[in-house]
Image: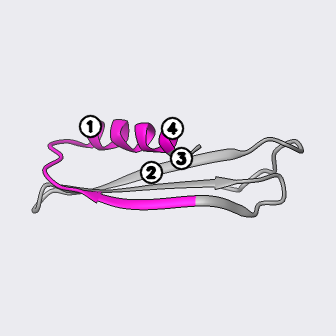
Amino acid sequence: MKWNPQNPGLYKVNFDEALFPHSGDAELGVIIRDEKCECRAWRSIRIPHVRNAELAEALAAGEHWKHA
């Protein structure tokens, strides 16, 4: 997967999650980049007791809206 620059004045938001089945934790990551591919903001958090990948992905999507 290759990063493609945005139009000037726009930002690109990417988010992802990792689920750790043995502990039930999820790690959520969000990064916001500008048209020059420069990081404008990022965040990584661990959330305990996430039961499945769909929930972890939804939490990651919600987290990106808090910081966009």
Instruction: Say whether disc 3 or disc 1 marks the residue closer to the N-terminus.
Output: 1
Residue 33 lies, in percent from the top left, at 70, 55
Q: Which residue is mark 3?
A: 67
Check disc 4: other Cα within 10 Å, few if <14, some if 14-19, many if 20+.
few
User: Which SS class for mark 2?
Assistant: strand
Q: Which residue is mark 4?
A: 65
Q: Which residue is mark 1?
A: 55
Residue 18 shown left or right of residue 61 in the figure: left
Residue 53 lies, in percent from the top left, at 27, 43
Which callout, 2 or 3, points to the residue nearer the camera? 3
Q: Which residue is mark 2?
A: 16
Which callout, 4 or 2, points to the residue nearer the camera? 4
Magenta residues span: 42-66
Residue 30 lies, in percent from the top left, at 50, 53
What amino acid type should be assigned to the residue bearing mark 2?
Asp
Identified at 84% across, 59% down, the residue is 36
